[in-house]
Amino acid sequence: MLKLGTKIYNAFVKSRPVLVDGTQRIMSNQKFSLKNPYILEAIPEEYIGTLDMLEGKKLRTVVNILDNPDCNQILARYKNFCTSKAGFNDIEFHELYKKAFRGQKVSSNINIDAMVFLNQLDPKVAKNFDAHGLAKISVPDQLRQLNNLLTKGIDKNRNFYTAPLATDFPQGAGACLGTPGGHAYRDGSFILVSGKSKSLIDDGIESVIVNDAYYGIIDDLRKKFPKIKFVEAQNAAEYFNKL
């Protein structure tokens, strides 16, 4: 059976033009890219999300990894290495706090926007999104918790409670979910949200609603975690209603 690495390499070769002498030139530093339609077509669908982390690496390196009998273990170690390096460090946290709060003490009169603007969400739409509000800890710790969740993922071995982003339950009927109103907490700095009709625990975090405490660093969050959609709480109703 043809190994996946070799299959990808052969697919890449087909994308290269044939020279006058009948040969094809393959550069020694040729990069692996899912943007190449020949490569993309050669990869089984279940591998595409995993191999995305190898984007831009040397093609020969990727081929060797995927042809290795211990391929899955190598990819798992590489993923852990990548995610452990991806988040903010202590120096960056210090600068982010200065930028968000302008060197002043964290005000108690913050994180109001989500409680106000999310009331404009259409419950029939919002109930299809699994959510978890980062609350019940200090505002600075909420940023650190977000960083931890986005770099290491949700620990499936620990309790992690989720609720719909909003519901159309009658008043009081959502108490079984353990949150006020039956929806995810809105009084923290961040609300983690799944994809539509997906689960945070099983499918991961697709977007994060950023409350007003951290509006000032939303561009920093987008640069650090480009695969996550960050939405200001004041714009969240419009964003999710369109979805």
Image (cartoon, rainbow, N blue to C red):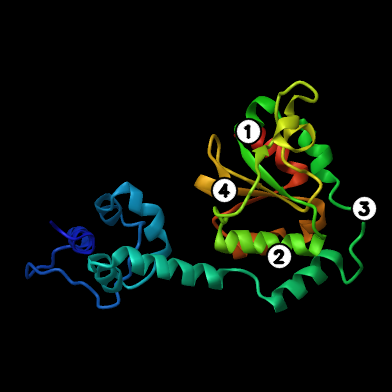
Dot 1: element: helix
Label 2 belongs to which residue?
Answer: 144
Quarter of the picture containing the C terminus is top right
**Nearest to viewer (mark 2 / mark 3):** 2
Mark 2 vs mark 3: which is more N-terminal? 3
Percent coordinates x, y for residue 240 in the rendering: 65, 36
Label 1 belongs to which residue?
Answer: 242
Quarter of the picture containing the N terminus is bottom left
Q: Are marks 4 and 1 in contact (CB under 8 Å)?
A: no
Amino acid, disc 1: Lys
Which dot marks residue 210?
none
| Residue at the image point whose x is 67% and y is 59% from the top | 146
Q: Are marks 2 and 3 in contact (CB under 8 Å)?
A: no
Distance, label 2 to label 1, CA atoms, is 30 Å
Distance, label 1 to label 3, CA atoms, is 30 Å
Distance, label 2 to label 3, CA atoms, is 20 Å
Mark 2 vs mark 1: which is more N-terminal? 2
**Looking at the image, which residue sits at the far top?**
170
Label 4 belongs to which residue?
Answer: 206
173 left or right, relative to 203: right
